[in-house]
Image: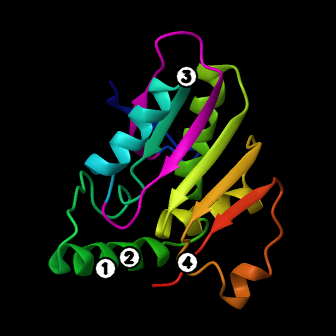
Amino acid sequence: MGQFVNLTSQDGFVVPAWVAQPDGAPQGAVVVLQEIFGVNSHIRAVADRLAARGYFAVAPATFARVRPDVELGYSEADMREGSGLKAAVEALPGDGVLPDIQAAIDLAAERSGAKVGIVGFCWGGLLTWRSACSLRGLSAAVCYYGGGMTSPDEVARQPLVPVLAHFGQR
């Protein structure tokens, strides 16, 4: 249903993103933020399911600034690799990957002509929280088990849009 496209961030960086479009006019748009496994089959399927329900969906590759074309599975080795990539992205100067997420929000608004929400899983949940607190063009945010969201620095942030955060215990 979807396909990869290239987005251009405010600083000129080209970030790949999975884009899934509904059959008819979009009833809204959703930016989907990856876990530490890249824009893998799970994240693409989430975007495709949203499109099947009438939403324009875009999933930017938030590892692209440190390594392109990351698609990991869920093995211990993949988890270690993904954690290392996350650490490299978190160490980026300035706003890190937030400009890439802003480019996805801008594309979603332009292509859908509708309100834009954002959803993220694990590390993507943390990036969703940060996006809700600092980026323009969002109407709502949903974080699933946002790793690191409860640290004092993150709790001190103030969201600009309504946020729904899901957490659980093992």
Q: Which residue is mark 2?
A: 88
Amino acid type for the residue under numbered disc 1: Gly
- Give the extent of the magenta segment: 13-37
Near mark 4 (Cα within 10 A), the count class, few <14, some 14-19 or many ≥20, is: few
> Circle 3 sits on which residue?
54
- Residue occupying the point 45% across, 43% down: 59
Q: Is residue 35 magenta?
A: yes
User: Mark 1 or 4, which is nearer the eye?
Assistant: 4
Q: Nearer the viewer, mark 3 or mark 2?
A: 3
Q: Position of residue 96 (x, y in %)?
A: 53, 65
What residue lies at 55% left-to-right and 77% top-to-bottom? 168
Horizontal side of residue 146 vs 74, given as left or right = right
Give the mark nearer the N terminus: 1 vs 4.
1
Given residues 150 and 98, the one toward you in this image is 150
Query: On the rendered image, what quadrant is the C terminus found in?
Result: bottom left
Task: Name the residue at the top extreme.
Answer: 24
Q: Which residue is mark 1?
A: 84
- Residue found at the far bottom of this picture: 152
Q: Are marks 1 and 2 in contact (CB under 8 Å)?
A: yes
Q: CA distance from mark 1 to mark 4?
A: 24 Å
Residue kind at label 3, given as amino acid type: Gly
Find numbered disc 4 in the image and state the secondary structure of the residue it sits on. Answer: loop
| Amino acid type, residue under disc 4 in the picture | Gly
